[in-house]
Amino acid sequence: MKNHQTPLKCLFIAATLLAAACSRIPDPPEEEKDPELLGISVDKQQVIIPAQGTAVLLLQVNEPGFVFNYDITSPQCQVELRVQGTTSQPECYTIQSIVPAQDKGSYKIHLKDKGIRLTYKEQVVLCLITSRAGYGKTMITTRAFEVISSLSQAGISAFSFTKSLNPSLDADVELKVISAEKGYDNTIEGNIPCWLDDMKLISTFTSGNPVKVNGVVQESGKTVNDFSKPVEYKVLTNEGTMLSYTVKVDLFTGLPVVIINTEGGQPVTSKEDWMNATIRIQGVQLFEDLPEMATEIRGRGNTTWYWPKKPYALKLESKTSLLGMPKHKRWVLLANFMDRTMLRNRIAYKIAQSTSLAWTPRNEIVELIFNGRHQGNYMLIEQIKEDKNRVNISDDGYILELDFHFDNVVQWVSPHGQSIQQGGIPFAVKFPDEEEITPEQVDWIKNYIDQAGQAIYGPDFADPQAGYRKYLDMQSFVDYWLVFELCINHELANPGSVYMYKDRDTKLFAGPTWDFDWGTFSYQASPQAKGKLFMTEAIWYKQLFKDPEFRALAKERWNALRGKFDQIPAFLDTEYERLALSAELNFKMWDPAESRNMNGGQLINGDEYLSYSSAVERMRKILIERIQTLDEKINAF
């Protein structure tokens, strides 16, 4: 018999369960955590870690029930130690372990020295990553506290030169104490931003233990040392460890300093008459110092001599090496007055040195102190002279300058070829000197240039035996042209400051390069150069480029040198950084924009009103663009 009570019984049970469910008090919602209530702190403002040892500090979390992962071996660990103001962890020490302390919410943190450096001292923070626990903030930190090695307590922690103890300073100078890796000396470095004739100074320093220099005990604020070269300070710690600190002081702008004093402190007013003077050089730890020696000095330059910042020629009493460059008597100080970058000549010579040209004038950027006054940033450069280390030719050789100024003693205009200024090509003999050259020598070189010109423009000009190749060294003329094209130097077409040389029984060679501060690395003076080659018709080049062999060699040389040219922008960046302080001081004295007053109101380089950094960046972009242009155009030959 069927049980008819089953459905009624089920209905009753369901109703009972539903009523019970409706009458249950719901669970309260989970309380949201307020990230502002969570905080962490440490119990010390300074933690001293023994060498190869550990130190303990206490971390306090102000919510004792807060749960987080403090296992430092776990990838999910929520505690980190960071250098203040960075996301970097300390290099010299680390968190060895974290363990709960006796009080709830407190944790002992053991910091261990890693043995990388003997001395260190820095501000750090402890970080607690909270995002993994559902908090809105991703991280909270303690206040900054100092971590210092125990040896640093004994060592030098502060070092300075004060004006009160060193009246030659313009202001107090604080140096930076830099900890070195274990096995190396610590360093103390800084810059004295004014020129000092004497680097014997009194230092003020803080040290936990006695300090010695060359075995002599040093007294802070009393002992005098000569800081023209690095000085080594030594400190013996209580543990018996000897700490060494090498003090390196950059003088002035960090560039070598050339000091010239004329007889009686008289100004240089002539390009023709030599004046007696003395010269010495502070190598500022980059080069050997030059002790004071006699020299003669006079002005130099065509247009540049009449500008406010003067260029000079030097004739030393004897052949002498300056700033590591080979010995010679004759040197030049270029003012680069119009050049806001102060780098046009420097970069052009670097480009020329990358080619096969036999010699490019070596140079260094310096500060000039003239009769006791700072005159700004100059380039000390080798003058173009016959010498085994310069233009290496015999006494029977010739150095020629193509110069539209036409103000030399031994000069003539060749009708073969073209120039903007003279119609023909103006030649001048620079070696042998005008006092020594004989009429026969003049006639000989004029005849050689005439024969070369006739061959270049003759019907058989491309013939290997009868044409121009009999007279000209092809590769030097190709590389010389490349330098002018890459630097956007229109002087090849004028021509001005264009050089060639010939030795006995050799062909005529192009070079060396000279004077690249006017209009270079800019389209201001040469707008026709943008996007194209623009020196293929200068002097003899219009005819030379008609020769397929010359064009092929130009293409070959470009592709051989392209890799070197691609490295020039990086060199420019390095030089920009190196000259930054010098530029700041130089442009407080000299304004390149004044050059337009001596150029018919026209800008020369187009960057005269820019800042130093903007001018260099403009130059950099044009250089890179120019490399790309030449790559496209030359490879289309």
Image (tube, helix red, strand yellow):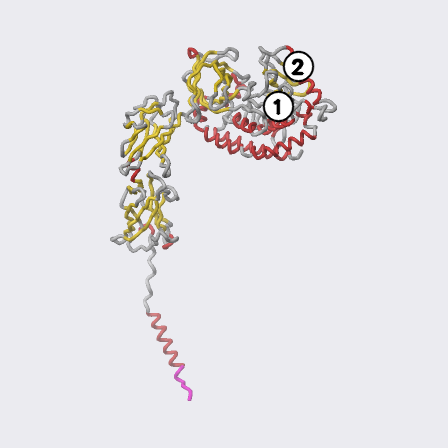
| Residue in front for this viewpoint, 610 or 623 | 623
Mark 2: few/some/many CA within 10 Å (<14, 14-19, 20+)? few
Q: Is residue 248 left or right of residue 456?
A: left
Give x and y (percent) for residue 523.
58, 28
User: Is the residue 237 above or below the residue 301 in the image?
Assistant: below
Q: CA distance from mark 1 to mark 2?
A: 19 Å
| Residue in front for this viewpoint, 521 or 46 | 46
Name the residue located 65 percent from the left edge and 20 percent from the top edge: 505
Name the residue located 53 percent from the left edge and 26 percent from the top edge: 344
- What secondary structure is the stretch in magenta mostly built from? loop
Q: Which of the 4 quarters of the picture holds residue 32?
A: bottom left
Tag 2: residue type? Trp
Asked if residue 521 shows in the view, the reply is no
- Residue at the farthest right position: 459
User: Is the residue 494 above or below the residue 575 in the image?
Assistant: above
Mark 1: few/some/many CA within 10 Å (<14, 14-19, 20+)? many
Q: Is residue 26 magenta?
A: no
Which portion, as a residue range, is magenta? 1-6
Q: Secondary structure at mark 2?
A: helix
* Image quadrant containing the N terminus: bottom left
Q: Disc number at residue 510?
A: 1
Give x and y (percent) for residue 8.
39, 81
* Image quadrant containing the C terminus: top right
Q: Mark 1 touching mark 2, by CB under 8 A?
A: no
User: Is the residue 460 above or below the residue 98 in the image?
Assistant: above
